[in-house]
Amino acid sequence: MTRTLRITIGTRPERNSLEDTLGAIDAGDGVYPNPSRLSIESLTTFGRIFGPTNLELLEAIVQHNPSSIRELARLVDRHPPEVTENVHELADYGLIELEDESRAKRPTVWYDELEFSGAVPVQGLDTDSDTPVAP
C-alpha cells in the first residue's frame, strides 16, 4: 500500500470543515491534524520548504536511512548545526519525523510519495511578504 502525503498550497477555508471542527470542539471532542495532509499557506513558504537544500536532505534520508542528524550531515557534506536547523523545519511541517535513538535523533520519512495541489494567484502576489494578495 502506498502512503501519500497530500500537500495543498494556499488556504481555501471550507465552511463545512470549519463547522465540523467547531462542532467537535463544542462537543468536547479532540481535534487533531490529519498527518497525511499538509497545508502550506503561500508559494513563498512552499519555495522555502521545498528548496534544493531541503530536497537534498529528504532524498538522503530516503536513500540512506541515516541513524542520526549528524550522519545525515556527513551524507550531504554540510555542518551539523545547519542540517539540524533544516531538519527541524522539515519536522515542524510534518515532512519528516525525528525518532529518539539513545542520545541522537533519527530522521525518517513515513510516506512513499508526495501529491501537490492548490491554486495560487499569479497577479497581485506580494513578493515581499509570505501571504498572497488578492488581485
Image: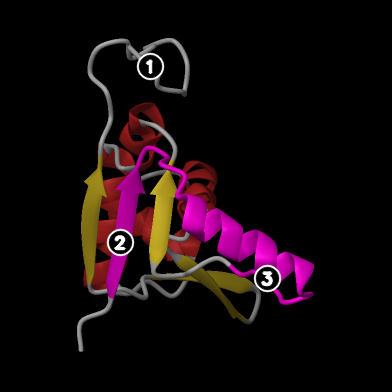
Sequence-first tag of 2 and 3: 2
Above or below for 70 versus 78 = below
How are the residues colored? secondary structure
Which of the numbered marks, if any, corresponds to residue 24?
3
Q: Position of residue 56 (x, y in %)?
A: 26, 49
Q: Are marks 2 and 1 in contact (CB under 8 Å)?
A: no
Task: Name the residue nearer the viewer: 68 or 35.
Answer: 35
Residue 109 position by quadrant = bottom left
The residue under label 1 is: 134
| Quadrant of the drawing holding the N terminus | bottom left
Residue 91, image x, y percentages: 50, 58
Q: Residue 38: x and y, percent? A: 41, 56
Residue at image point 39% right, 11% down:
126
Mark nearest the camera among 2 and 3 is: 3
Residue 99 seen anywhere in this rendered image of the structure = yes
Q: Is residue 78 left or right of residue 62?
A: right
Could you say whether the residue bearing mark 3 is in a helix, strand or loop?
Answer: helix
Residue 9 part of the magenta segment: yes
Q: Which residue is mark 2?
A: 6
Location of residue 52 (image quadrant): top left
Residue drawn at the location 32% of the way across and 54% of the way down: 7
Q: Which residues are magenta?
A: 4-32
Residue at left offset 32%, top offset 10%: 124
Amino acid type, mark 3: Ala
Q: CA distance from mark 3 to mark 1?
A: 31 Å
- Amino acid under label 1? Ala
